[in-house]
Amino acid sequence: MKRLLIIGAALAALLTPASAQQTGKLLNASYDVARELFGEINDAFVRHHPGVTIDQSHGGTSKQARAIVEGLEADVVTFNQVPDIEFLVRNGFVSPGWQEDFPNQSSPFYSMPSFLVREGNPKNIKDWSDLVRDDVKVIFPNPKTSGNGRYTYLAATAYAKEAFNNDEAKVKEFVTKLFDNVPVFDTGGRAATTTFVERNIGDVLITFEAETRGIAKEFGEDKFDIVTPSVSLLAEFPVAIVDKVVDKHGTRELARTYLDFLYSPEGQKIAAERGHRVNDPAVAAEFKAEFPEVRLLTVDDVFGGWANVDKEQFGPGGLLDQIYGNR
């Protein structure tokens, strides 16, 4: 997959002496499982910018976007799906050209839905086809409230489209069976992790690859195995300045410096250490051995873009509504 290279301008946050940096405060509204990632990124950023404070808000990004429209004064968003930023565009909070503001269509790193199973993989789960077996219970967050869950839904649908040669009836049957195997739908990715890891519910957790790696490190690699499916869906993590808020707070320059830092070698290395695949060539090469090869499909290639996804999959009466029903 061809991706844009990191541009030199994005390194400005590190090349400028700390004494010349801005002071001030930002609120970053981010996705549910990014707490540890941005805790570390923020600590590093503040070391280079003494006097700056970065506050965090975490949750399912669809809920985060609605909260901003309803009054949450986030200066920047670091989300996990494009439609939630487009929701802010439609409501006048983010400029329409936001994907041109930063490299890689304003996505500093990426991931994909991956599997986490119990140690030894007792159910022998290897690919998406195993998730619809009668003896397998699957955990992932609610696609109606979680970008993480939406990527899982889309990845499973993309797999079924290939497996059944775009036979709509068979695709619907496959995804319906997958949903039937989910004993509980949590509202966000971190809650789903808690259900699987701490409540010991389910045979497999589907979440971002970065989250599977983080869980294994935190709770013990002797307790869980990471399973990379044969194919998955590219999950980008788009970022944007919330224009309406930074203009009110006078924080536009600081907001841009902060998001630029995500593209710097230091920011990219932190993301890679936290299990994200990155675009900086040198950092990606350094961590290449830690990330297995996988064929990544894209929303554009499989579904014709996010606009089509919103209409055909997530819109009223769309496939998700038909499958999800009253769960």
Image (tube, rainbow, N blue to C red):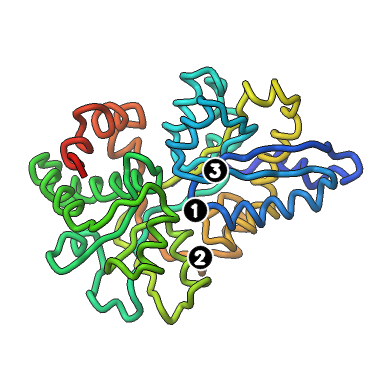
- The residue where tag 2 is placed is 214
State the image coordinates of residue 15 (x, y, percent, origin top left).
82, 45
Name the residue located 44 percent from the left edge and 39 percent from the top edge.
81
State the image coordinates of residue 302 (x, y, percent, origin top left).
28, 39
Q: CA distance from mark 2 to mark 3?
A: 17 Å
* Label 3 crowd bin: few (<14), some (14–19), many (20+), radius 10 Å: many
State the image coordinates of residue 138 (x, y, percent, origin top left).
26, 61
Instruction: Kindly report which numbered mark, 2 or 1, lies closer to the viewer in this rendering.
Output: 1
Q: Secondary structure at mark 3?
A: strand
Which one is earlier in the sequence, the residue at label 2 or at label 1? Answer: 1
Q: Quadrant of the C terminus?
A: top left
Label 2 is placed on what type of residue?
A: Gly
* Quadrant assignment, res 36: bottom right
Q: Residue 30 — which label?
A: 3
Q: CA distance from mark 3 to mark 1?
A: 9 Å
* Residue found at the very far right of the displayed protein: 19
- The residue where tag 1 is placed is 33
